Image (cartoon, helix red, strand yellow):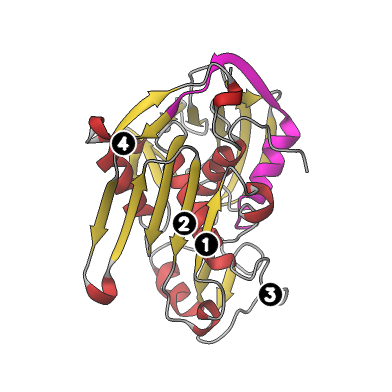
Amino acid sequence: MLAQRTLKSLTKAVGVGLHSGQRVELTLRPAPPDTGIVFRRVDLPKPVDIVVSAVAVTDTRMASTISSGNAKVFTVEHLMSACAGLGIDNLYIDITAEEVPILDGSAASFVFLLQSAGIALQEVPKKFVRVIKPVEVREGEGASTKWARLSPYEGYKLSFEIDFDHPAVDSTGQRVEFDMGSDSYIRDIARARTFGFTKDVEMMRANGLALGGGLDNAIVMDDYKVLNTEGLRYNDEFVKHKILDAMGDLYLLGKPLLAAYSAFRSGHAMNNLLLRELLAHPEAYDIVSFTDDKTAPKGLAQLAPAW
């Protein structure tokens, strides 16, 4: 049986929010089978649970935000991406502020946290959302076109193409395809950092955003070049970070996908629209498990190796 996964023990991290600049503590704890991933705002007078789902997403400006009532948690995508990359099904995430810490701007620190706690197999089948008919969302025309699509595929792969019209970005890889069956999330995707432009920072900070951002947790560019002295971690780090984000956004569905995701100039908003479009067409997907993990698509049954 291809089993659900949680943590063997709890693990903690402390950091600052990218946009809020607030100090925040995270405690990642094991959860029972079929719990899903649950964020818990433990700083509120009465703690509030926010269960991950596509319809819990309430804001997609600059990051993915999930809410329950008046409680929210934003910038969840990097932690969710790490959970997707390691196949974590059930997890409680206690958080002491409204934004997940940015740490180094990638998913690598979250992967390390999850693996340091150990991954436990649970005696319950892992449930996948299997796409059986294509769904697509699209916006704009001509140079402003952007789109995202889910297609049937016996496994999980993602392809993404970017178009930023910036010399530092244009000189790197513009398109990446990542397949869970043949590639390594930890090696190929997890270390790709978020990025931004100095010309946008003033505007963002005037709007209360990017207050915790800097060269230690993002790739920062002026009009011509990357300002980080150490340069890029991958020669196509920009588009790989878009894959990282997409994996996190799509895992907000609440279950792993069996599908091929492809996108051009997509982002958090379009990724969530794509999930809602899928859920609006029940004939386009079903829920499947694998009683024999040898019959599961390659790459989904094996536990990722420790660092």
Label 4 or label 2, whichever comes before in sequence order: 4
Q: Earlier in the sequence, mark 3 or mark 4?
A: 4
Above or below residue 144? Residue 53 is above
Give the SS element for disc 2.
strand
Q: Can you identify the residue that label 2 sits on?
A: 159
The amino acid beneath tag 1 is Val
Please give the residue where the numbered disc 4 appears in the rendered image. 55
Number of on-image labels: 4
Say which of 250 and 286 sits in front.
286
For the C terminus, the image quarter is top right
Crowd rating for badge 2 (residues with CA inside 10 Å; few <14, some 14–19, many 20+): many
Q: Which residue is mark 3?
A: 231
Mark 2 or 3: the one toward you: 2
The reply to whether discs 1 and 2 touch (Cβ–Cβ < 8 Å) is yes
Mark 2 near mark 3, Cβ–Cβ under 8 Å? no
Secondary-structure class at tag 3? loop
Mark 1 → mark 4, Cα distance in angstroms: 28 Å
Highlighted magenta segment, given as a residue range = 103-128
Query: Element type at marker 4?
Result: helix
| Discs 3, 1 touching: Cβ within 8 Å | no
